[in-house]
Amino acid sequence: FYPEGRPDILTRFIRDAIAPGVDPVEGHRACARYVMEDRIGLITSPTLLIGASSDPFALPEIPRLRSGLVNAASVTEVVIADGHIPLMEEHPVEVANAVREFLTSE
């Protein structure tokens, strides 16, 4: 699920995952413990949803997230082309531009 031709990103993930005292699964467990569905409707601020076009796990969840943001002042959705699971590391400029545009447009 990592982009071809970017061994640096995968190497960084592996290095972080096997670091002493780090449980690479704990981040996933923490996310699973947080029941977002109970709280997402409380969001009232403008909200930006960023997706990666080639993320088979998170991208399909964007419509469900959007449908839960019933009280958000506005919802902006941006999908970064050719993005994979490590979107922030793979396309930092595109992500930063999306955030900057969102923050300056609201």
Image (spheres, rainbow, N blue to C red):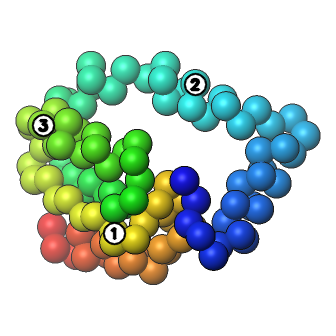
Residue count near mark 3 (Cα–Cα under 10 Å), binned few <14, some 14–19, many ≥20 = few
Q: Residue at x 9, y 49 (%)?
A: 73
Nearest the eye: 25 or 84: 84
Q: Secondary structure at mark 3?
A: helix
Amino acid type at mark 3: Ser
Residue count near mark 1 (Cα–Cα under 10 Å), binned few <14, some 14–19, many ≥20 = some
Nearest the eye: 103 or 77: 77
Amino acid type at mark 2: Arg
Q: Secondary structure at mark 2?
A: helix
User: What residue did someone put label 3 on?
Assistant: 67
Q: Label 1 vs label 3: CA separation?
A: 20 Å
Q: Secondary structure at mark 1?
A: strand
- Residue 43: give x, y in percent of width and height: 21, 37
Amino acid type at mark 1: Ile
- Which of the numbered marks, if any, corresponds to residue 80? 1
- Residue 4: give x, y in percent of width and height: 59, 70
User: What residue did someone put label 2 on?
Assistant: 29
Nearest the eye: 22 or 86: 86
- Which of the numbered marks, if any, corresponds to residue 91? none
**From the viewer's perspective, is the residue at label 2 or at label 1 nearer?**
1
- Residue 67: give x, y in percent of width and height: 12, 37
Q: Is residue 70 left or right of residue 47?
A: left
Res 6 seen here: yes
**Disc nearer the start of the sequence (2/1):** 2
Q: Is residue 74 left or right of residue 6?
A: left
Nearest the eye: 1 or 42: 1
- Residue 39: give x, y in percent of width and height: 27, 25
